Image (tube, helix red, strand yellow):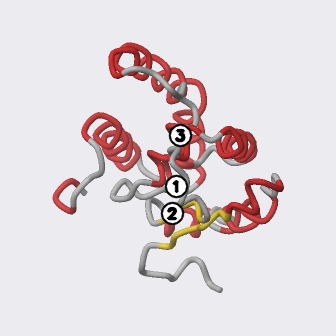
Amino acid sequence: MNLESFGDPLVVVISREMVESGDIDSILVILKRFIESPETAKANMERIDIAFDGYNNTSEELFEILEVRNYVNRLDEKFPYWLFLLSKHMLGLQSLMYCFLPPFLTDKAKADIYPKELEKLLVNRWGPAMDHISQYAGLSDAEIKALALRVQKYFTQGRLTEKDT
């Protein structure tokens, strides 16, 4: 499969079995192919989504399930390039983000805690990773700034529409 030439968004699906077994290696192989060269990374920028399969019949949200949270954290330790690769038109990035925020909060607590926790995640982890992979892919300063603005809009206003890109 030539990852430099695909045109449609690609969804990387993580099965419940992978989560329960802790198998991040299979997904890492796929994710690393999206950045195997600067050209491949640039071609795949914001073209990927990530989804979890096998949790449709649970009453909990994905981010409330400890095994999912642990899996995402372990995966992120090896591959933090979500802001660069993941589409801002889909919900995969949001699903990952919630795994880094405290679950089971009241709406008031969420309003108080989530912005601070998200800022820490963006400043300390995902932002530097985005900058690193953006430079690796050869993005111009203007392209990096535009990407950062889309990230900001995504986290403050929700999924982007076609007019936002």
Q: Nearer the viewer, residue 25 or 20?
A: 20
Q: Which quarter of the figure has residue 108?
A: top left
The amino acid type, in three-letter code, at marker 2 is Lys
Residue shown at the point (49%, 47%) measured from the top left:
95
The amino acid type, in three-letter code, at marker 1 is Gly
Q: Residue furthest bottom?
A: 1
Residue shown at the point (54%, 49%) measured from the top left:
82
**Disc 3 element:** helix
- The spot of residue 1 in percent (x, y) is 65, 86
Dot 1: few (<14), some (14–19), or many (≥20) neighbours within 10 Å?
Answer: some
Q: Residue furthest left?
A: 163
Dot 3: few (<14), some (14–19), or many (≥20) neighbours within 10 Å?
Answer: some
**Disc 2 element:** helix
Earlier-in-chain disc, 3 versus 1: 3
**Disc 1 element:** loop
Residue shown at the point (50%, 51%) measured from the top left:
84
Q: Which residue is mark 1?
A: 138
The amino acid type, in three-letter code, at marker 3 is Asp
Earlier-in-chain disc, 3 versus 2: 2
CA gap between label 3 and label 2 equals: 13 Å
CA gap between label 1 and label 2 equals: 8 Å
Dot 2: few (<14), some (14–19), or many (≥20) neighbours within 10 Å?
Answer: many
Give the label on residue 131, or none. Answer: 3
Residue shown at the point (25%, 57%) measured from the top left:
165
Pointer 1 and pointer 2: residues touching (CB < 8 Å)?
yes
For the residues carrying marks 3 and 1, which lies nearer the camera in this image? 3
Pointer 3 and pointer 1: residues touching (CB < 8 Å)?
no
Q: Which residue is mark 2?
A: 42
Q: How many marks?
A: 3
- The spot of residue 78 in percent (x, y) is 75, 46
